[in-house]
Image (spheres, coloured by chain):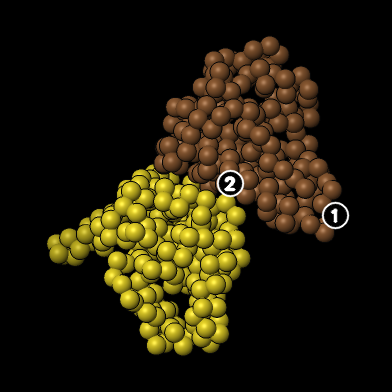
Amino acid sequence: MFTLPELPYKQNALEPYIKEETVKFHYTKHHNGYVNKLNNLVEGTDFANSTLEEIIKNAEGGIFNNGAQVWNHTFYWEGFSPKGGGTPVGEIAKAINNSFGSFDDFKEKFSNAAATLFGSGWAWLVVNKQGKLEIVQASNAGNPIRDGLKPLLTCDVWEHAYYLDYQNLRPDYIKNFWEIIDWVKINERLINA
Amino acid sequence: MKSILTILILIIMSSTINLNAQHIQKELNYEFNALEPHIDAKTMEVHYSKHHAGYIAKLNKAIEGTEYSEYDLMTLQKLISEKTPAAIRNNGGGSWNHEFFWDILTPTKGMKPSKKLNDAIIRDFGSFDSFKSEFKNAALGQFGSGWAWLIIQDGKLKVVSTPNQDNPLMEFAKEKGTPILAIDVWEHAYYLKYQNLRGDYIEAFFNVVNWDKVSEYYEKAIK
């Protein structure tokens, strides 16, 4: 059985950047919904005892979609902190400068990837096979693990992630997204990668 | 001689104008609040004046100076292939799909499919309820952003869905046909009122379908 991981903070903790109501629906309806659908779909299949990563790498259709969405949302929530924002620290700061020139250049490129992903999906900062940082876009439930990349940071650009707060103004959501990034966590992910 | 020249100049001028055709957003046939409570005024306002208007503005920019600028919106859809630049495919689809969508909605209550359309629904789906349930499943099952459609394909009715702003008129559509009914299942179409409950939105949609218009499209398409 897959379960919904606890949110690492209260549902109102990301205010004013992401409102409580948005977090409530996003976490208790969408994220939880993916967990429930996944459990229904894997029952009696080879994936019933798989990890989410195995599902992301090998599954197709509904099992992939729901499995990847469970993983993506957990990763998204865990990348935030009410004390987040500011500039990267530690290894991640160096790696960003090495790969993108500066934090501002990186921010611009990542924001652009998030803003221009057409339809539903995710923007990702990943470590590629050469050990360099890279920004990728993925539609719908797409997850870079499937392509052998290691995710460090993600921005959910499904409309449900921002519509109650920002409606059509996805760029405003992305601008505020930077205010809640937990760079300590992102740095840990890099070190573990 | 002079009049021939004038005519020639006029032809050249009109073809130039045509080459630089800008698409203009059609006015809605009803007020933003007219579809309440099924589709709320705020959703209609943002959907029409931000999302739809945005697609048209971006389309006009994307087609400027290209071969795609010579056509009306409907013709443009049929010319969109896998080789078409993404900005034209996405914004072209977004422009036409929404125009079509507004057109098959109405605040008028109690409309029903015409006899001809109703007969065809029973012929191709067994009953109106089976059609409705197939259409609802297609709309629910479109993962991510997209549309569900009722189309005419080889003279028969068929329910299909497309991702993002693609539609059944486009060259590469897996299921091609002439749309007579559509539902937008991008989250922006229902999120302010229904949030995660797409199924409730689809049920509500059936209260505001302009069956006169859908019947008209059907009868025109089978002629």
Along the viewing direction, whichever of A128 and A9 lies nearer the viewer: A9
Residue A46 — which label?
Answer: 1
Q: Which chain is yellow?
A: B
**Which chain is represented by brown in the image?**
A
Which amino acid, by three-letter code, is at mark 1? Asp
In-image side of A148 versus B160 (left or right): right
User: Which residue position is annotated with label 2?
Assistant: A30
Q: Residue at x 25, y 57 (%)?
A: B31
**Where, by quadrant of the figure, is residue A56 drawn?**
top right
At x 48%, y 85%, the residue is: B120
Would you say A21 lies left or right of B71 here?
right
User: Mark 1 falls on what kind of element?
Assistant: helix
In the rendered image, is residue A135 in sight? Answer: no
Q: Name the residue at 28% across, 56% down.
A: B33
In which quadrant of the rendered image does the C terminus of chain A lie?
top right
In the structure shown, which secondary structural element does the residue marked by tag 2 occupy?
helix
Residue B116 numbered tag: none
